[in-house]
Image (tube, rainbow, N blue to C red):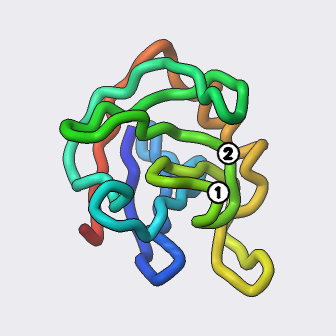
Amino acid sequence: MNLIRVALNEHGMFGVLIEREVPFAVTLEPDGGEDMGYIPSGTYDCRSTMYYKGGYPTFEIIVPGRSRILFHKGNTEVDTKGCVLVGEEFGVINGKPGILQSGRGFSEFMASVGDSFRLTVKGLV
């Protein structure tokens, strides 16, 4: 699976998830400091885990030097502290750029992966 980043602004890093050359979801990573910054470009193993705060299964991106970088539901940068939010489309929420239909996008993401997968992150950083 590929995460291709397409835009960066003060509200975060926006990207597109692509599987077998087909884009199927959008993403948002926070505009954070050293501990909550963007995932460096590269290829990472992803393993099944629980998102305890949300109470649902998800995947952790294994990033050296960091822990608990998860995919999860959310719409704007305030919904994450370093994780990758997944949704269906880009949009504006309360006057700020974000992602919409996160529940549906996250469900589609979970249905597209098995027990583990490799993620290649490309673009902008």
Q: Circles 2 and 1: CB distance less than 8 Å? A: yes
Label 2: which secondary element: loop
- Residue 53 located left or right of residue 1: right
Label 1: which secondary element: helix
Q: State the image coordinates of residue 31 (x, y, percent, origin top left).
A: 43, 70
- Residue 109 located left or right of residue 43: right
Q: Which of the image's four quarters has the C terminus?
A: bottom left
Q: Which residue is mark 1?
A: 79
Relative to 15, is 24 above or below? above
Residue type at mark 1: give it. Asp
Q: State the image coordinates of residue 4 (x, y, percent, origin top left).
A: 38, 58
Q: Residue at x 77, y 75 (%)?
A: 93
Viewer-proximal residue among 82 and 27: 82
Furthest residue toward bottom = 95
Q: Residue at x 23, y 54 (%)?
A: 40
Q: Earlier in the sequence, mark 2 or mark 1?
A: 2
Q: Which residue is mark 2?
A: 73
Q: State the image coordinates of residue 5 (x, y, percent, origin top left).
A: 39, 64
